Amino acid sequence: MTQVHQDTVLSSYGPRKDLTGTAREWHNRMGHINQNAIRKLQEKTQGVIVTDMDSYDTNCEIPYEKVHLDLIQMPEAYDGSTQALHLQCDFCRMNHVYTIKDKRQVTVLQTIKDF
């Protein structure tokens, strides 16, 4: 190996640098995990440093306090449905999907009401 190439080769056996981030950044990096999970992440793993933990506050404190919604167009299903209504709880990340026949406001609102 020439000197030029040898200088650019990195060893995969060397120790990795610690990853540092605020509690909010770790919340986003790890798929919106809760505050307790972020604490355990730092305790149970090597190389994870969580800063600013005391100022971190979760958005939702009870299940279904905040729900995200998507309306997805899909090919016509066997029952004539052409839309999928996807709802996700911000607190527990539970997903619910309902198929509906159209995207009219009355249909979508009735499905949400029944949810």
Image (spheres, rainbow, N blue to C red):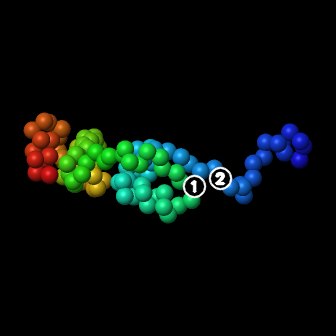
Upstream in sequence: badge 2 or badge 1: 2
- How packed mark 2 is, by other alpha carbons closer than 10 Å (few <14, some 14-19, many 20 or more), is few
Residue in view at x 48 percent, y 57 percent:
42
Do the residues bearing badges 2 and 1 touch, measured as CB atoms within 8 Å? Answer: yes
Question: Any mark on residue 47, and which?
Answer: 1
Residue in view at x 84 percent, y 45 percent:
6
Q: Going by the picture, which residue comes out furthest to the top?
A: 105
Horizontal and vertical percent position of residue 40: 44, 61
Q: Give the left or right position of residue 25, taking residue 7 as reference.
A: left
Question: For the residues marked 2 and 1, what is the alpha-carbon distance in whole angstroms?
Answer: 8 Å
Q: Going by the picture, which residue comes out furthest to the right?
A: 2
SS assignment at label 1: loop
- What residue did someone put label 2 on? 16
- How packed mark 1 is, by other alpha carbons closer than 10 Å (few <14, some 14-19, many 20 or more), is some
Horizontal and vertical percent position of residue 56: 36, 46
Q: Nearer the viewer, residue 110 or 92?
A: 92
Horizontal and vertical percent position of residue 89: 25, 51
Question: Any mark on residue 94, and which?
Answer: none
Q: Give the left or right position of residue 34, taking residue 101 as reference.
A: right
Residue in view at x 47 percent, y 46 percent:
51
Q: Give the left or right position of residue 13, taking residue 3 as reference.
A: left
SS assignment at label 2: loop
Q: Is residue 51 visible?
A: yes
